[in-house]
Image (tube, rainbow, N blue to C red):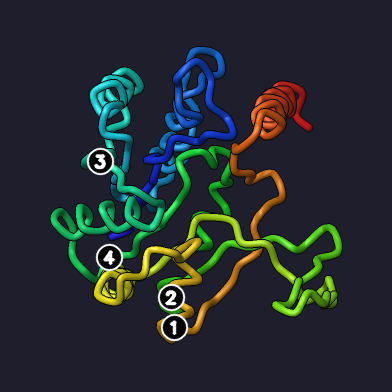
Amino acid sequence: MNIAVIFAGGQGNRLYYHSRPKQFLEFRGKPIVVYTIEVFQHIQTVDAIVVVCLEDWIPYLRGQVEKYALTKVADIVPGGAKGQDSIYNGLVCAKKHFPEDSLVLIHDGVRPLAMEKTIVESIEVAKKEGNSIVCVPAMETIVIKETDGSLEVPDRDSVLMVRAPQCFVLKDVLAAHQKALAEGRHDFVDTCSMMKHYGYELHTIRGTAENIKITTPADYFMFKAIIEAREESAVFGF
């Protein structure tokens, strides 16, 4: 089975509007996280969805799931103190409902512009290679600051920016999380860095530049512009 694990358990302090976390910020009356869930709801090869949510907002999200007929949502569980903890909670929930050889597509709740083509390719590559990480080429020069203060400038053609989803076999990614917990590690910035740390060879696919994570007000305005541009393209056949 192919399971989307969407984590929307953060407060989002960089984009927090009148005590409403960023994932629940609305566009045309619909929360961002619902746009994200709908992407996976409408993809035939995605069998089910688990959502990790701020505990106080779970009743609200359940209402939104019913309102928008998001029938693939199998469960909604509370988030943790950090993103790593929230993802783990979602994976544990997935294991309760689905076989451990399922593929899990780990995705940000505030990344609502992922394309169906990207998600389908993620599943195909992960089935063949054991995992897949969506990336995009770096559009600007990257500088690495060393511990001694010196700077390294890698060749931009060799630099990729990690996006989402990140797709893994459920039993593999759960095992990595359990190792991290046993070691008291809660500092992995994302799942692919954890998997790399524990010896997994990672496989990348190319995503789209518009698959942004809505973190700042500028991201939110870009999201609105992209939605409107997509609608115009559909109407005028561009």
**Label 1 amino acid?**
Tyr
> Which amino acid, by three-letter code, is at mark 4?
Ser
What whole-number distance in Å separates the C-alpha atoms at marks 1 and 3? 28 Å
Mark nearer the N terminus (2 vs 4): 4
Front-lying residue, 96 or 149? 149
Residue beneath the point at 34% across and 55% down: 87
Where residue 76 sits: x, y (%)?
A: 24, 38
How far across and down, in percent of the image, does residue 165 sit? Answer: 49, 56
Residue at mark 4? 102
Q: Which mark is residue 200?
A: 1
User: Of the residues under marks 3 and 4, which one precedes in the sequence?
Assistant: 3
- Residue picked out by circle 3: 78
Q: Amino acid at mark 3?
A: Pro
Residue at 59%, 34% (x, y): give it.
Answer: 14
The answer to whether marks 2 and 1 mark residues whose Cβ atoms lie closer than 8 Å is yes
Can the viewer see residue 218 in this picture?
yes
- Give the class, few, some or many, for how many residues have Cα within 10 Å of label 2's Cα (few <14, many ≥20): many
Q: Are marks 2 and 4 in contact (CB under 8 Å)?
A: no
